[in-house]
Image (cartoon, rainbow, N blue to C red):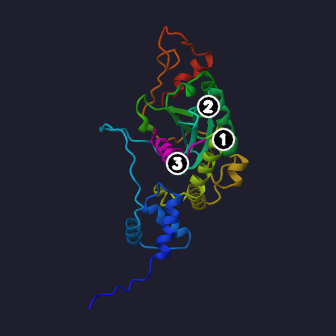
Amino acid sequence: MRYVSKRPSDAAERALLKELAAERRRFGYRRLREMAKRRGVVMSLKKVYRLYKDEGLAVRRRGGRKRATGTRAPLGRAARPNAIWVLDFASDTLDSGRRFRVFNVEDQFTRRGLAVEVDTSLPGRRIVRVLERLVALWGRPAMIISDNGTELTCNAMLRWTSESGIAWHYIAPGKPMQNGYMESFNGKLRDECLNEHVFSSLAEARRVIEAWRVDYNEVRPHSSLGYLTPEEFAAAWVERQGDDIAPDASPCHRARSHQGQACGSAEGAPSLTRPARDGATDVRPGRKNGSAGAEQKNDVADQTKNRFNL
């Protein structure tokens, strides 16, 4: 006599997991379980893991560089939507070998990707136009965090920051994890989108990357948000807050009910690490004294540089 298993067939669940894994090749079994739940198939974590291993769906780790360990300064966290925006650049190449850049903006609290601007050149004035568009759409953030890239420390950016009244925090040079939320966003963009596609044109890159941003906001479950999407998390936060919507919020800000308080004040901003920019020099960052192309800041920059000493 031999034991005959009475376990019901898992064929439907296996087929669903394989379908989801084919669509989302960089998702692990926990996130695949959440995606299956959204299709009405509820399975225990142990069962999902068993089927995941049986079907050979494990995600192969990509090799990475070694990282030094040591003490890290605590990273400030936003307590509400629109309190802190984080931004940075990513880059990739077309199949012709031509390089392009992606300017990314994310709301730190809701993890909502606000913009992915794609082009071969993204100078400071272009970045200002993107930020102005986002401010008109979502309202002003209390603070913006970025690195010390030349596009973000140029005179056009300093002038716009002074006129808009938004506090700007520059992380220390060589310390990308002081902007860890954006590093996480860039990592997901590269892992789930840039590394998964070969772009034949800039138009195709813009279309695919923007589609990924929409999916990131509205479909992709985030483990840091309790496996909610950023849109679901923002809506749940607003519901908990009730109708306490700031009177100076933008029309879109209020109509979509995704932001909860005033966006224009830097009061109550979290305590962050000291910015690298301390106003000790009048030479634009990235240029050596006496080198060709070294430029002096204008009067507006001189008047505003000490404001970045948080």
The picture quadrant where one finds residue 2 is bottom left
Residue that appears at 43% across and 83% down: 8
Residue 191, magenta (yes or no): yes
**Residue furthest to the bottom:** 1
The picture quadrant where one finds residue 151 is top right
Q: Of the numbered discs in the image, which one, if any, rests on residue 100? A: none
Residue 215's place in the image compared with 267, above or below, is: below
Verify CB contact (< 8 Å) between mark 1 and mark 3.
no
Residue 290's place in the image compared with 299, above or below, is: above
Numbered disc 2: secondary structure:
loop
Q: Position of residue 139 (x, y in %)?
A: 66, 43
Q: Of the numbered discs in the image, which one, if any, rests on residue 120? A: 2
**Residue furthest to the top:** 290
- Label 1 to label 3, Cα distance in Å? 28 Å
Q: Which sits in the foreground, 112 or 12? A: 12
Residue 196's place in the image compared with 161, above or below, is: below
Please, what is the three-letter code of the amino acid marked with disc 3? Glu
- Label 1 to label 2, Cα distance in Å? 21 Å
Q: Main secondary structure of the magenta part?
A: helix
Q: Nearer the viewer, mark 1 or mark 3?
A: 3
Q: Of the numbered discs in the image, which one, if any, rests on residue 134? A: 1
**Bounds of the magenta span?**
179-199
Q: Earlier in the sequence, mark 1 or mark 3?
A: 1
Residue that appears at 52% across and 42% down: 268
* Quarter occupied by the N terminus: bottom left
Q: Position of residue 175 (x, y in %)?
A: 41, 33
Please, what is the three-letter code of the amino acid marked with disc 1? Leu
